């Protein structure tokens, strides 16, 4: 089966937000401390990291992750890519490069951002990552693990979600095309972003995320990419319908 480990469940600023006086940022509940969004999926002996959060080094240390078989990128925004350099110690331990899968636009962005990794002359000791282009709706494999890239809209930006077995992982969405809703209908686990209570141009609000959850009809829906504006998790969890849970850093599930 598939094992899912939430490494980070926060938005681009994380929680606590620097200098913020709100109740969430001053909560004593460890579940209210959220690093930037990233998950580890394990299946068939393969370990697949989705997004390289700016907090990746600490996430890998916290969970003792010393090997990776692949990296999947949802999109190029900083809170999903800024930790790429932190795979270096894994390269040193594994003595091989790590394949990283992304759409063409994200690959171009990574090449520019990490010119010292992907340029003509790679800087000695820089991460060893092999960029592989993928497209929405076209499945690919990591070992024996089948992965389907899903079309997702993040404001006006077309990004990717991923379906792995009976798990669908979607973050930073503001809209899901009908095709994607059809592909993930009835999955065992749906992970979906819920930024805040009020609408936002590029992210689902809590109400919108719950609407999507209802359409998909997953066994369990887990909310991620949550901001401090949602309030402390204990208080917010009481508002959630049956079958919908707020994820938190370190939450682990076996499908």
Image: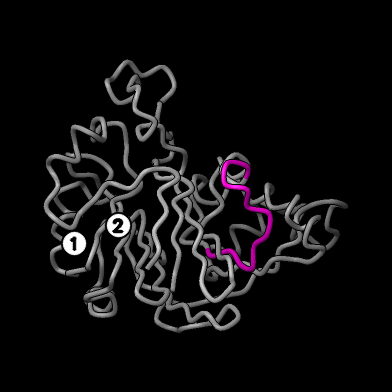
Residue 112's disc is: none
Point 86% across, 59% down: residue: 121
SS at mark 2 in the image: strand
Circles 1 and 2: CB atoms closer than 8 Å:
yes
Horizontally, is 133 left or right of 236 in the view? right
Check the image and report above or below for 250 versus 215: above
Horizontally, is 239 left or right of 173 in the view? left
Horizontally, is 34 left or right of 200 in the view? right
Question: Which quadrant of the view contains residue 191?
Answer: bottom left
Q: Position of residue 106 (x, y in %)?
A: 54, 62
Q: Nearer the viewer, residue 105 or 197?
A: 197
Q: Which residue is denoted by mark 2 in the rendering?
A: 192
- Give the spatial CA distance, label 1 vs label 2: 8 Å
Q: Position of residue 88 (x, y in %)?
A: 74, 51
Q: Does the magenta-highlighted stretch encompass residue 169?
A: no
Q: Does the magenta-highlighted stretch encompass residue 69?
A: yes
Question: Which quadrant of the view contains residue 111?
Answer: bottom right
Point 39% across, 30% down: residue: 30
Point 43% across, 40% down: residue: 12
SS at mark 1 in the image: helix
**Quarter the C terminus occupies:** bottom left
Q: Judge the density around disc 1: few (<14), some (14-19), many (≥20) Cα neighbours within 10 Å.
A: many
Q: Nearer the viewer, residue 208 or 165?
A: 165
The span picked out in magenta is 61-72
Residue 213's disc is: 1
Q: Position of residue 52 (x, y in %)?
A: 56, 52
Question: Which quadrant of the view contains residue 155?
Answer: bottom left
**Quarter the N terminus occupies:** bottom left
Q: Earlier in the sequence, mark 1 or mark 2?
A: 2
Q: Position of residue 55 (x, y in %)?
A: 56, 40
């Amino acid at each position: 089966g598939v094992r899912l480990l939430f490494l980070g469940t926060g938005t681009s600023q994380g929680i606590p937000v620097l200098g913020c006086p709100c109740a969430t940022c001053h909560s004593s509940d460890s579940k209210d401390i959220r690093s930037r969004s990233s998950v580890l999926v394990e299946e068939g002996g393969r370990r697949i990291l989705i997004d390289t959060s700016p907090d990746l080094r600490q996430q890998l240390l916290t969970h003792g992750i010393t090997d990776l078989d692949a990296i999947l990128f949802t999109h190029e925004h900083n809170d999903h890519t800024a930790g790429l350099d932190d795979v270096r110690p894994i390269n040193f331990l594994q003595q091989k490069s790590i394949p990283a899968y992304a759409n063409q636009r994200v690959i171009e962005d990574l090449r520019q951002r990490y010119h010292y990794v992907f340029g003509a002359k790679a800087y000695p000791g820089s991460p060893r990552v092999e960029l592989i282009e993928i497209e929405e709706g076209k499945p690919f494999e990591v070992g024996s693990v089948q992965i389907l890239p899903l079309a997702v809209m993040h404001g006006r930006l077309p990004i990717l979600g991923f379906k792995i077995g009976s798990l669908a992982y979607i973050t930073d969405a503001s809209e899901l095309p009908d095709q994607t809703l059809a592909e993930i209908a009835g999955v065992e686990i749906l992970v979906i972003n819920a930024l805040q209570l009020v609408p936002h141009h590029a992210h689902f609000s809590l109400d919108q995320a719950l609407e999507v959850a209802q359409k998909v009809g997953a066994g369990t829906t887990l909310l991620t990419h949550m901001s401090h504006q949602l309030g402390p998790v204990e208080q917010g969890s009481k508002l959630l319908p049956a079958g919908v849970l707020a994820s938190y850093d370190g939450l682990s599930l076996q499908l």
